[in-house]
Amino acid sequence: EKYSSYGLASQSRVQQTVATYFRYSLMDLLQKMVTGSPQFVRCIKPNDTTSPRYFDKDKVIKQLRYTGVLETIRIRQNGFSHRITFNDFLKRYCFLAFGYDETVVANRDNCRLLLVRLKMDGWALGKTKVFLKYYHVEFLSKLYEEQLRKIIMVQASVRRWLAKIYCKKQKWQLACSVVTLQRHIRGWLARR
């Protein structure tokens, strides 16, 4: 009876160790998936009868069309290496072509307008994504970095101006406090 509680404690430690091991192995697996580029395989069913040497062409084409494989092949053949959803595209690049007071809805027309305003050509728009070639992404990244640098310079200037005003205000308050303190000390010395 004296050692039965000891046995339970050791079993719970073993269970915690197994749970900890599982958690760490799961974190390791997720880390490997993030750092690597996993490839996913789409399985296509060649026929409904599951016979090994029969190939139903219409069924396979229908599956390829529904899974988007044919569209992907066509896009890749045209050389569009970057595919970005309308929402992500406009979130990242809308400030390059739209004013800060313009409300920009993530749709096909606004993506087209942004690309036209930036005088880009050779891109394509799908149902939900913008298709860009590698040089489009380089051009957009360069513009993005330039605009970001300008924004940071303006922010730094405004912060410097605000700090200057704050310092002047603090200096004025300090001077007023010193004068008040001197007045009180002179009054105290005169009464003494």
Image (tube, rainbow, N blue to C red):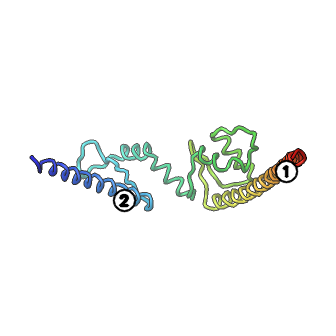
Q: What secondary structure is marked by label 2? A: helix
Query: Tag on residue 11?
Result: none
Q: Left or right? Give the position of 57 relative to 116.
A: left
Say if residue 176 shows up in the picture: no
Is residue 186 positioned above or below 28 on the image? Answer: above
Determine the CA span between mark 2 and mark 1. Answer: 63 Å
Q: Residue at x 43, y 62 (%)?
A: 36
Say if residue 42 shows up in the picture: yes
Q: Left or right? Give the position of 94 relative to 3.
A: right
Residue 52: give x, y in percent of width and height. Answer: 24, 51
Residue 138: give x, y in percent of width and height. Answer: 65, 61
Question: Which is more foreground, mark 2 or mark 1?
Answer: 1
Count of picture labels:
2
Q: Residues within 10 Å of mark 1 (few under 14, many from 20)?
A: few
Q: Type of residue at label 2?
A: Asp
The residue under label 1 is 178
- Which corner quadrant of the image does residue 29 belong to? bottom left
Residue 192: give x, y in percent of width and height. Answer: 86, 47
In the depicted view, which residue is nearer to us: 7 or 90?
Answer: 7
Q: Left or right? Give the position of 122 relative to 41.
A: right
Q: Which residue lies furthest to the right in this view?
A: 190
Q: Residue furthest front?
A: 192
Q: Type of residue at label 1?
A: Val
Q: How crowded is mark 2: few (under 14 residues within 10 Å), some or many (20 or more)?
A: few
The residue under label 2 is 28
Q: Left or right? Give the position of 177 relative to 13.
A: right
Q: Which residue is drawn at 44% across and 45% down?
A: 65
Of callouts 2 and 1, the N-terminal one: 2
Q: What secondary structure is marked by label 1? A: helix
In the depicted view, which residue is nearer to us: 39 or 154?
Answer: 154
In the depicted view, which residue is nearer to us: 40 or 92?
Answer: 92
